[in-house]
Image (tube, rainbow, N blue to C red):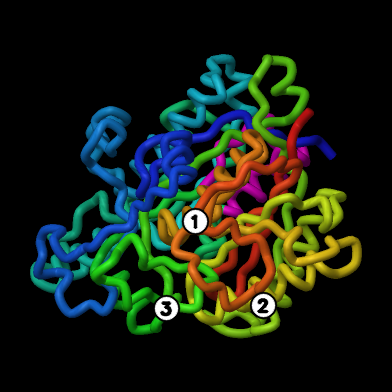
Amino acid sequence: MRRVVVTGLGAITPLGVGARNTWSRLLAGQCGIVNLKSRPPEERWKGLTSEVAGLVPTQGEDGWRPGEWLKPDRSMSQFTQYAVAAAEMALTDASWKPSLQSDLDATGVCIGSGIGNLEAIYDTSIAYQDGGYKKVSPLFVPKILINLAAGHISMKYGFRGPNHSATTACTTGAHSIGDASRFIAFGDADVMVAGGTESCIHPLTFAGFGRSRSLATQFNHDPAGACRPFDASRDGFVVSEGSAVIILEELEHARNRGANILAEVEGYGCSGDAYHMTAPREDGSGALRAMKQALKNAGVKPREIDYINAHATGTKIGDVAEAKAIRTLMLGEDGVQSESNVTISSTKGAIGHLLGAAGAIEAVFSILAVANDIVPPTLNLDSPDVGIGFNFVQRIAQDKRVGAAMSNSFGFGGTNASLVFTKHP
């Protein structure tokens, strides 16, 4: 089996444009969650129970300006635009812009999204209802297909390796990275552009998740305090947008071209809860199976995991289930001696829940934790009521040697994935 390493990162998040810009603001304890009520047109947000979201900023030195990354293209939805820009950042970071046909044939793309483009679906449905067939744009289908993010990246650079998209709710980003790593491990590609992207800040999103009682509603007056992973006052997740893309590469391929190796992808595990449409198993057994599979795949013992980037979205049930799974894993056979030796943080407190892109941006944070030996904080964690005794990295980043990090992602439908990244010598 061929070994897989990470050689480039790109991201667009509620903390700004750029993976390392986002990382520095995350470590500084900044938050990108804001109130939506004043976002024009203001009337569309009336009557919603949750008024907070993680929005990609458009102002400031590191704000999102599509013209800096893309030529005008009416077929590209915003989630696709984010992915194309994040891919450009990652490819530049990896110094991988091949021109030889053999290199183009050996480079693939695996970018997924959970929801993609609700705006086009909503607007086109109304246009069709009011005006019929001729009111439907010929670009409607290309704008809503999830795989068009990967498709546009492949076409832009001429990458003719595997062209793949996962769409597994909030596990999408992790599945995309894990699947891409296996394309390389099994020899289908030498390089993969992998990650997730999402942009569905739309009233229908908030109405749908709101009706399922999934969203944070008690902190509309305090957006920065709305996402509260593991905290006793948590009351739901915060919808966010953005994209994260990483460049995966076969180890010898990276070495031969002198690439900067940030970390190694050692493990990938998947599982299903087979339990409920939206709720995890209360004992966390589905999540536990994914983590165990990832460790088995990596050949790593639980006690060797120095940091866990938790999925923890700030829901009452989800955070409890994940904490139980982590406790069972880390304090069981081949585990650590005490809860204080288990270091966990949920970076959603700073950026909210990027849905289909969550697993990808959290993989980026895990990779940077391994590369820089620093653990990002869990914001808004004042009074943990689960995982008592764990080192939750409350509010302030911690310096810590991170030889191995695990990143967890779980989604509606009971789909689970865990990734293990290790320090490369």
In the image, is 81 to the left or to the right of 348? left
**Mark 1 vs mark 2: which is more N-terminal?**
2
- Location of mark 1 (residue): 395
Q: In front: 61, or 272?
A: 61
Q: Please give the count of numbered marks on the rendered protein.
A: 3
**Secondary structure found at label 2:** loop
Q: In front: 402, or 100?
A: 402
Image spot of residue 216 (x, y percent): 37, 74
Give above or below for 91 relative to 119.
above
- The quadrant in which the C terminus is found is top right
- Tell me the kind of residue under disc 1: Arg
- Gap between marks 1 and 3, in whole Å? 19 Å
Which quadrant holds residue 308?
A: bottom right
**Secondary structure found at label 3:** loop
Residue occupying the point 28% across, 74% down:
50
Give above or below for 364 relative to 220.
above
- Location of mark 2 (residue): 273
Looking at the rendering, the stretch of residues picked out in magenta corresponds to 174-195
**Mark 2 vs mark 3: which is more N-terminal?**
3
